[in-house]
Amino acid sequence: MHIQNIVFIVLFLAALSLFTYNLLRIRTYLMLGRSDNRFSNAGKRIMKVLGIGIGQAKIFRDPVAGLMHAMIFWGFLVLVTAVLEAFIQGFYSGFSLGMLGSVSQVFFASQDLFGLLVILSVIYALFRRYILKPKRLTGDGSTNADATFILCMIMGVMLTMYGVNATKSLIHPEYASYYKAHFIASHLVFLFKGNELTFYNIFWWAHIVIILTFMNYLPYSKHFHIVTSLPNVYLSKIGPQTLDTEEIDFEKEDVFLGAGDIEQLTWKEMFDGYACTECGRCTSVCPANLTGKPLSPRKIIMDIRERTSEKAPLLVAGGEIPAEIESKKLISEHYITDAELWACTSCMACVQECPVNIEHVNPIVDMRRFLVQSESRFPEELMTVFGNMENNGAPWAYPQSDRLKWTEGLDITVPVAAEKNDFDVLYWVGCAGSFDARYQNVTRSVATLLDKAKVNYAVLGTEEKCNGDSARRLGNEFLAQMMIKENVETMKKYNFKKILVSCPHCLQTIGNEYKEFGGDYEVVHHSEFINGLVAEKKIEIDDSKKTDQKITYHDSCYLGRYNDIYEEPRELIKKTNKGELAEMKRSKDRGLCCGAGGGRMWMEEKIGKKVNIERTEDALETNPDVISTACPFCMTMLTDGVKEKGKSEEVKVKDFAELVLESSK
């Protein structure tokens, strides 16, 4: 064994030990958080890693920057062969991939090809950061310095690889015929003839030292995502995004009342901080940020990481935490302010765009829970909303006895569950469908269509209460769980096969979150259900009644991004209208929130431009006759937006259920 091998082994073991130590150190920080099971459904998780992680599916939502990042990522995967060759040579100097014969030529050619692609991508990344300066990459000086150092390290790995590949043919002439596959490096050989061994050793050692330095710099860098991104994709939620707060016994002394600091977050919420790539894609699509609110989803995640780095080592070490550290808190002017948290509409656009599947909304809601349940600190107007929910079972001040007033004047009889008992479909009308004057017409339209199709259905009427969505998103988990449990107990009294809802918030909460409370139901939105009735000819469209209008459709966040329902509403619009279906510039999974989600429906917008105006302008740009919606909140926000823009005489806001009824036989 040569002295070079001994030096390498010592250096390699020291670097590996330091890297392992840092991984274990960060793991101890994460263990401070609350439990969260993220290891079920291994098969589905592996498929996500293959598609989103390895395949870089989400990174290409921004095609130019996406290609750049993908080339660097895929380049590193391919160039593992070069790294392994160099490391094995550290243990045994005579090793070469050339030993594999003609197979090695595939490795050598791919190394040169992807090395070039990585170099070009790094050059573009630096140009983009310092010359183009996209807004979403804006950060402090340390952020830019860190990114630049990482990019320069990557460039160093590539250049030294080419140096090694160019000189090794002179060191190992027995494999020279195979080394010709290095179609770039082979043309550089002439530069090093006569001093090939010296140059080889310089390039080889530089290659090794840069890689080991790079590896051990990452745990201290804001680019630790290079290590954590694939695990974070694996650990991300399977299926619909939900607020997975288990049933809480509020009689216990140690009950979870929200996250005021890092140790009250889940370990996964803390891990998201270490997986953040700081690309800013989340913030670039955030409706609150786009309209001048203080919220930046990227900052939320970065602040969680910074607070973890500040406080977690002290918690792990034990003993008393200095007052100046303890007093900062996660929710404070030092990190995340109340205004940031209350600006969130829970639209999930940030999660949709994140290339490593960070879940920004969950910690925001956990911190709202702390403000509401531990601090009683929330916007003044929510006091009335919470009171109405607790006393009337709805956000509005209408009495429970008024829940069937929407049926007055209908030509049909709406069956009530208490009088029918057995039925196939429970039509969950919802609070807006029961009390909102405009949305009552949508409820009447759905009920009339159900009657036309002879669907065996019933409504709960005065037994129905708010599903709990707004209370949960606003952080009042105690109130939300109280309503959820009451609704589950009510529904247990009846036999039905599925629940039909008109509100996407009801779809999300009852369909995906009631399972935690014993309410495992098949829940369908009326877009899916009515589309099925039309397809089965149970509802027939009269061609002579079809409208000839230009219609644009607004995607509800809770119908689209939360539940992946995009096409059914569009199909119904096409079936009922002979005119154009015009798509907004931001549509489907890129659609912009109306501004009402996350409980924002019940709060005033006092900062910046109103979100509903921003979205209304998107709709009006298509020059429509009708803006179609599939959500009561969206209908309210867009109706108000059209009115504020002075277009209410020219542009109507309608639910597609109304369009179907108007054109049906």
Image (cartoon, rainbow, N blue to C red):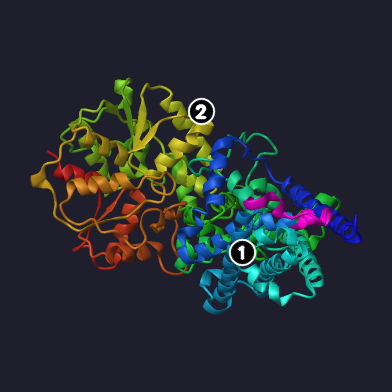
Quick check: 405 above or below 396?
Answer: above
Judged left or right of residue 430, residue 110 is right
Magenta highlight: main SS: helix
Q: Is residue 338 visible?
A: yes
| Residue 112: mark | 1
x then y, percent, for residue 356: 57, 53
Q: Residue 529's quadrant in the figure?
A: top left
Residue in front for this viewpoint, 272 or 476:
272
Name the spot of residue 608 as percent of width and height, x first: 45, 69
Q: Amino acid at mark 1?
A: Asp
Which quadrant, please, contains the N terminus? bottom right
- Residue hosting label 2: 518
**Span colored in magenta:** 86-103
- The disc label shown at residue 460, or none: none
Front residue of 484 and 53:
53
Residue drawn at x 49%, y 55% as measured from the top left: 58
> Is 554 on the left or on the right of 454, as rendered?
right
> Which class describes the residues within 10 Å of circle 1: few (<14), some (14-19), or many (20+)?
many
Residue in the picture at 81% in, 69% down: 197
Q: Secondary structure at mark 1?
A: helix
Residue 96 is one of the magenta-drawn residues: yes
